[in-house]
Every structure is written in C-alpha cells, then in structure tokens.
Image (cartoon, helix red, strand yellow):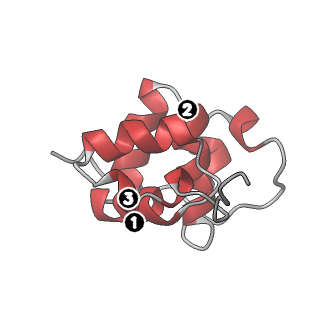
Amino acid sequence: MEAERVNKTDPKEVFNPVLFWDADEIDIERNASYIITRILDYGNEKDIKLLRGIYPDKKLIEVVRKSRVLMPQTGKFWAIYFNIPPMEIACLRAYYQKKPLE
C-alpha cells in the first residue's frame, strides 16, 4: 500500500534539510534518485513515509536496484522489503573481479 501523495517541489521543505547538506538546489523530479538514495540511507520512519507519498514504489524499486551509492545494509533491507533478488541490487555487487591468490 502506498502512502498518500505529497505535492511539494523542494525536498528541503518536505524532509529534514540536514539530509541534503551537500546540495544547494534540488529538483524533486530531476534529482529523484539522489533524494531517494539519501532518504533510504539516512531518513527516519517519517521521512520514508513522506518519500513513499512523493514517489511510487516502482520508482523506489528502480533506485534500489540501480544505485551503486546506496549503503549495502540499506540495499539488503529494501531487497527483502520489496522482494528483490539480492543479485539484482547494484550496491551489493562487487565492483571488480576477485582474482584467486597464487
């Protein structure tokens, strides 16, 4: 079940502005992946509820699958929550091929 939709354009007005300390101007549509990643990693329950009111679960799932900057523990949690196979989560994949020790 998705939360009630929120109609705001500035995420600093919707969420705690401290979550976006490193950004001056943020567009809720253009910077959706950045906002979603930041809230999933550092937001609280209230932030998550608001996030789900702004973006559909389909968008959250897309970000969880594709984001390489999402913290691994965050990726694991949302993979379980949304029933996504861990192999489809970019932040859980190795960035390099491990070579066997010789």
- N-terminal of the pair, mark 1 or mark 2, is 2
Q: From what the image shows, is residue 80 above or below residue 29? A: above
For the N terminus, which image quadrant? Answer: top left
Amino acid type for the residue under numbered disc 3: Met
Q: Residues within 10 Å of mark 2 (few under 14, many from 20)?
A: some
Q: Quadrant of residue 18?
A: top right
Q: Nearer the viewer, residue 93 or 15?
A: 93
Q: Quadrant of residue 64?
A: bottom left
* 89 sits to left or right of 36: left
Identify the residue under disc 2. Answer: 43
Vertical order, 100 against 17 (above or below): below
Q: Secondary structure at mark 1?
A: helix
Q: CA distance from mark 3 to mark 1?
A: 14 Å
Residue sitting farthest toward the left: 1
Quarter that holds the C terminus: bottom right
The mark nearer the N terminus, 3 or 2, is 2
Residue denoted by label 1: 62
Query: Farthest residue in the bottom direction?
Result: 30
Query: What kind of residue is marked 2?
Result: Gly
Which residue matches tag 3? Answer: 87
